[in-house]
């Protein structure tokens, strides 16, 4: 029996983000949203920035779910 391949993805947009698991099985891709979060902007010195620390913490939350569920995430074997 062939094991399904799982991939972890992060989708960051202008106002929100999410972490996703994509599972490849039987020549089909199934997407599951793990977390969804706001992308709060920071305004400093007449410039607007993404709050990179908040985004980092949200990505870590998604990875913790992956670890708790013991999902076998594929990695890039080229590097």
Image (cartoon, rainbow, N blue to C red):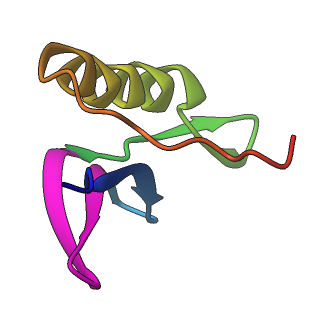
User: Where on the picture, by quarter, is residue 49?
Assistant: top right
- Residue 68 lies, in percent from the top left, at 15, 14
Q: Nearer the viewer, residue 32 or 77?
A: 77
The N terminus lies in which quarter of the figure? bottom left
Does 47 sit above or below residue 71?
A: below
For residue 49, side relative to residue 4 (left or right)? right
Residue 21 painted magenta: yes
Q: Nearer the viewer, residue 28 or 60?
A: 28
Please report the residue visible at 26 percent of the width from the left and 56 percent of the height from the top. Answer: 2
- Residue 70 lies, in percent from the top left, at 20, 21
- Residue 72 lies, in percent from the top left, at 33, 33
Please report the residue visible at 34 percent of the width from the left and 25 percent of the height from the top. Answer: 63
Give the total number of marks visible in the rendering.
0
User: Where on the picture, by quarter, is residue 62?
Assistant: top left
Residue 62 painted magenta: no
* Stretch of the chain drawn in magenta: 19-36
For residue 24, side relative to residue 48 (left or right)? left
Does 24 sit above or below residue 41?
A: below
Q: Main secondary structure of the magenta part?
A: strand
Q: In the displayed orientation, state which residue is furthest to the front.
A: 1
- Residue 11 lies, in percent from the top left, at 42, 60
For residue 20, side relative to residue 32 (left or right)? right
User: Where on the picture, by quarter, is residue 31?
Assistant: bottom left
The C terminus lies in which quarter of the figure? top right
Does 28 sit above or below residue 32?
A: below
């Amino acid at each position: 029996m062939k094991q399904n391949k799982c991939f972890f993805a992060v989708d960051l947009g202008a106002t929100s983000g999410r972490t996703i698991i994509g599972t490849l099985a039987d020549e089909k891709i199934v997407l599951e949203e793990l977390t969804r979060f706001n992308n709060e902007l920071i305004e400093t010195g007449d410039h607007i920035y993404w709050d990179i620390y908040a985004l980092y913490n949200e990505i870590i939350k998604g990875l913790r779910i992956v670890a708790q569920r013991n999902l076998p995430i594929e990695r890039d074997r080229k590097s």
